[in-house]
Image (spheres, rainbow, N blue to C red):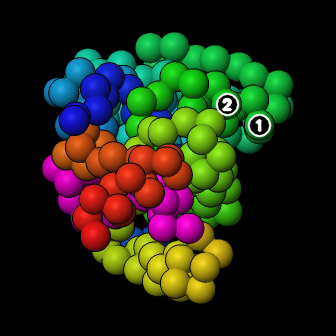
Amino acid sequence: MENKIKSMAVFCSSAIPKNPIYEQSIRQFGRHAATQNITLVYGGASVGLMGAMADAAIEKHGKVIGVIPSFFSKKEIAHANLTELVFVSSMPERKQVIADNSDAFVVFPGGFGTLDEMFEMLTFSQLDFHQKPLILFNINGFFDDLIKQLEKMNVEGFIRDSHYSGFVVANSIEDVFSKAENHKVMNETEWLKWAKIEK
């Protein structure tokens, strides 16, 4: 059964990284989302990878919703040309509003904030607060070591097999959108039923 993806949350950096492949990829992603009529929901900044993605989508007449804390608007300059810009009072509220307005989550290479957003959404999936797919976009092998760590956490029993279905890895723009449409996030009951059938 396919997921009906009308909007995607994008977790990405407010910095421009040293390797230009990351900015090139996120611009390509933004343009592709616009051509697919998929609304992008992100942190609302006009700088770094955030701004690059928003600019690329807007250039192709795509819909982009930004969510930014009021106290960040000076540091992370709020994007002035979005379809909608929502000001919130805190970081937790920012993540909640982004999640509530998205059908899937896409994680681009980034730093502490990006990983914080990713792991919070995975934790909420584990707790059955949502069953939305999370796609880890492994550009240039950026997440290779993190993926190995997550695999180890699963093997060692810290992440249950059912909870491990909360994310999937993509290696290309096309793969991101395909997996957002087709990846199934299972709750514990669904996983046990599936595992029994497979055995």
Residue 41 placement, left or right of 168: right
Under circle 2, the secondary element is helix
In front of the other: 29 or 48: 29
> In the displayed structure, would residue 143 be above or below residue 32?
below
Q: Name the residue carrying label 1.
A: 92
Please tell me which residue is depicted at 62% across the width and 36% down the height of the picture. Answer: 129
Residue 112 placement, left or right of 41: right
Please tell me which residue is depicted at 38% across the width and 26% down the height of the picture. Answer: 7
Residues shaded magenta:
160-177
Viewer can see residue 143: yes
Q: Position of residue 10 (x, y in %)?
A: 46, 42
Q: Is residue 171 magenta?
A: yes
Q: Name the residue carrying label 2.
A: 96
In front of the other: 136 or 23: 136
What is the quadrant of the N terminus in the image?
top left
Residue 83, quarter of the rendered image? top left
Residue 28 placement, left or right of 86: left
Label 1 to label 2: alpha-carbon separation: 6 Å
Mark 1 vs 2: CB contact within 8 A: yes
Q: Amino acid at mark 1?
A: Pro
Q: Position of residue 64 (x, y in %)?
A: 42, 23
Q: Amino acid at mark 2?
A: Gln
What is the quadrant of the C terminus in the image?
bottom left
Q: Position of residue 67 (x, y in %)?
A: 62, 27
Please tell me which residue is depicted at 17% across the width and 27% down the height of the picture. Answer: 35
Q: Residue at the top extreme?
A: 84
Q: Residues within 10 Å of mark 2 (few under 14, many from 20)?
A: few
Q: Is residue 82 magenta?
A: no
> In the displayed structure, would residue 39 be above or below residue 180?
above
